[in-house]
């Protein structure tokens, strides 16, 4: 039995590169009696760093909501531009004198740019943190919007492509951020909701990208008037992007002074010298459940990217002259998806049923795609609105589920790295599916193209069933709480836990 004055500790075994960074099943919790401390409304953890005891308080800050909303806002501005060309594909084809497939690349460049740049960006996120990533993202996005402002002439397609490339590069600094911001700023009971809010901004931007361009850029015959409408759209985007960049410069914060959860308090014990980005990537690629999630996430989100990019072509083929309604259908998909995302995030925070929820939503995405495929050609736009909304609710609602499930499977690896690998898979499949479905639509019609996507959604649903639900982050929080029992009368912590960092080598 431990001595009366000996403090409890969490003891970690040595971690090798072929193991998880934190083998939660092997944690030994050594319990002993300590003098009680009054810590009103706060959880205290004593962290042992290089032999020096320092007290860290677990605390939630109100400004966390402003941080996630600011991120959502600049994510919105960036994702709006992903689809702003594709949803009025036929108008930009005529203005710049290019083919349909060339305009499709204005959306696909977002996917293509992500693949080679994701690894250096996640490395930068690990080394420099959230604020540097936010500054670079908003600066690149702002630069891209102003380049587009200068490209509103029929012979300057290369310039508008350059502007879109800058915005697509900014997206690499954005897509993997929701789960990272949620983990760094939010408590364990709201982290999934916060991630959903982060993804919400991206989805809302796509929704506005479906709705606004057909309104701002009508299909007029006069080229000078058309150029005027396009320039108005570009100027509005540039103004918003500039405002958001200035806000990030002035107020975006790296992280809260005190950690929001016990898992984050533990993560702060790891010094930069102990962390190896290459070893982290290798551990993730040896994590079999996470590898299955990478594949299934890519299949689902890749299908969503293909549907979004080719929506104008599919609607116009069956409903000629309905560019405005094509945008509204895209808006319906995203709005329904945003509702789905928030519901799923709240559900996860309350139930922690990550695999069950992910599998259910995946299966419903497959069913929704199947129904959409067979009702698109019926000749009734209201039916398309209805089926597209159902498809969006589940397919777009899956996005934060994949992020949060990935973080659970890979904790305590960097959230930006796991999210980056998921997004990389989505971009690869997005390019493949967009090109293949576009060719199938050209040669065999929209039904064949949509059935092509249904096949891969079915495969993804089956593979999701084989993912082992090993929720590492939940185990970390539960074990930390078990090691720091609370006073049943006032809910305060009676004994701080000592986390011995010297027993937690990463190499």
Image (cartoon, grey):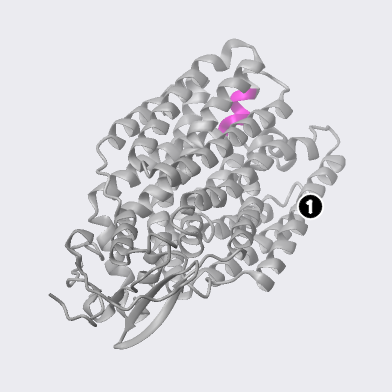
Locate residue 159, reporting x and y percent.
Answer: 68, 56
Dominant secondary structure, magenta = helix
Describe residue 495's horizontal placement relative to residue 113 as left or right: left
Locate residue 402, reporting x and y percent.
Answer: 41, 45
Mark count: 1
Q: Residue at x 29, y 56 (%)?
A: 475
Query: Residue 165: within the magenta?
Result: no
Describe residue 120's horizontal placement relative to residue 379 as left or right: left
Q: Which residues are magenta?
A: 310-315
Q: What is the crowding at mark 1: few (fewer than 14 residues within 10 Å), some, or many (at least 20)?
A: few
Image quarter for residue 75? bottom right
Locate residue 181, reporting x and y percent.
Answer: 51, 61
Identify which residue, 272 or 490, lies in the foreground.
490
Q: Residue at x 73, y 29 (%)?
A: 324
Q: Residue at x 37, y 56 (%)?
A: 418
Q: Residue at x 79, y 32 (%)?
A: 219
Q: Quadrant of the C terminus?
A: bottom left
Image quarter for residue 264? bottom left
Q: Secondary structure at mark 1?
A: helix
Identify which residue, 406 or 429, lies in the foreground.
406
Describe residue 356's horizontal placement relative to residue 260 as left or right: left
Residue at mark 1: 236
The furthest residue to the top: 378
């Amino acid at each position: 039995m431990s001595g009366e004055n000996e403090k409890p500790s969490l003891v970690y075994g040595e971690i090798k590169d072929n193991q998880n960074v934190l083998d939660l099943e092997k944690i030994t919790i050594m319990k002993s009696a300590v003098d009680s401390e009054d810590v009103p409304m706060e959880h205290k953890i004593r962290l042992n760093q290089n032999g020096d005891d320092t007290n860290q308080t677990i605390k939630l800050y109100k400004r966390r909501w402003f941080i996630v909303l600011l991120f959502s806002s600049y994510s919105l501005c960036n994702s709006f531009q992903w689809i702003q060309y594709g949803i009025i594909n036929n108008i930009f084809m005529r203005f710049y004198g290019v083919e349909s497939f060339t305009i499709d690349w204005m959306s696909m460049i977002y996917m293509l740019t992500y693949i080679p740049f994701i690894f250096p960006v996640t490395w930068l996120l690990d080394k420099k943190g959230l604020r540097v990533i936010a500054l670079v993202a908003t600066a690149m996005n702002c630069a891209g919007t102003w380049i587009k402002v200068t490209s509103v002439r029929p012979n300057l397609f290369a310039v508008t492509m350059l502007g879109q490339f800058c915005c697509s590069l900014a997206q690499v600094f954005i897509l993997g951020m929701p789960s990272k911001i949620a983990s760094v700023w939010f408590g364990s009971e709201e982290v999934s909701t916060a991630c959903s809010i982060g993804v919400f901004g991206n989805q809302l931007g796509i929704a506005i990208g479906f709705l606004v361009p057909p309104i701002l850029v009508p299909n007029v015959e006069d080229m000078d008037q058309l150029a005027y409408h396009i320039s108005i759209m570009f100027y509005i985007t540039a103004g918003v992007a500039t405002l958001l960049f200035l806000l990030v410069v002035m107020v975006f914060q790296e992280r809260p002074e005190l950690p929001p959860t016990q898992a984050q308090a533990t993560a702060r014990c790891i010094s930069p010298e102990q962390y190896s980005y290459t070893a982290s990537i290798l551990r993730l690629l040896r994590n079999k459940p996470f590898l299955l999630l990478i594949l299934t996430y890519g299949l689902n989100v890749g299908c969503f990217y293909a549907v979004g990019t080719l929506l104008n072509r599919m609607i116009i083929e069956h409903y000629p002259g309905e560019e405005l309604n094509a945008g509204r259908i895209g808006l319906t998909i995203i709005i329904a998806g945003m509702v789905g995302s928030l519901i799923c995030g709240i559900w996860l925070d309350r139930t922690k049923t990550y695999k069950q929820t992910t599998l259910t939503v995946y299966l419903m995405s497959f069913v929704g795609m199947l129904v959409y495929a067979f009702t698109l050609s019926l000749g009734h736009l209201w039916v398309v609105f209805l089926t597209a909304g159902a498809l969006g609710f589940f397919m777009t609602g899956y996005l934060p589920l994949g992020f949060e499930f990935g973080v659970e499977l890979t904790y305590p690896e960097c959230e930006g790295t796991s999210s980056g690998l998921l997004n990389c898979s989505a971009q690869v499949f997005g390019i493949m599916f967009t090109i293949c479905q576009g060719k199938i639509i050209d040669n065999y019609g929209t039904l064949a193209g949509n059935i092509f996507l249904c096949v891969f959604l079915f495969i993804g649903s089956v593979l999701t069933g084989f993912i082992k639900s090993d929720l590492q982050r939940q185990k970390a929080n539960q074990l930390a709480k078990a090691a720091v029992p609370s006073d049943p009368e006032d809910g305060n912590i009676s004994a701080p836990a000592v986390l011995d960092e010297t027993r937690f080598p990463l190499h």
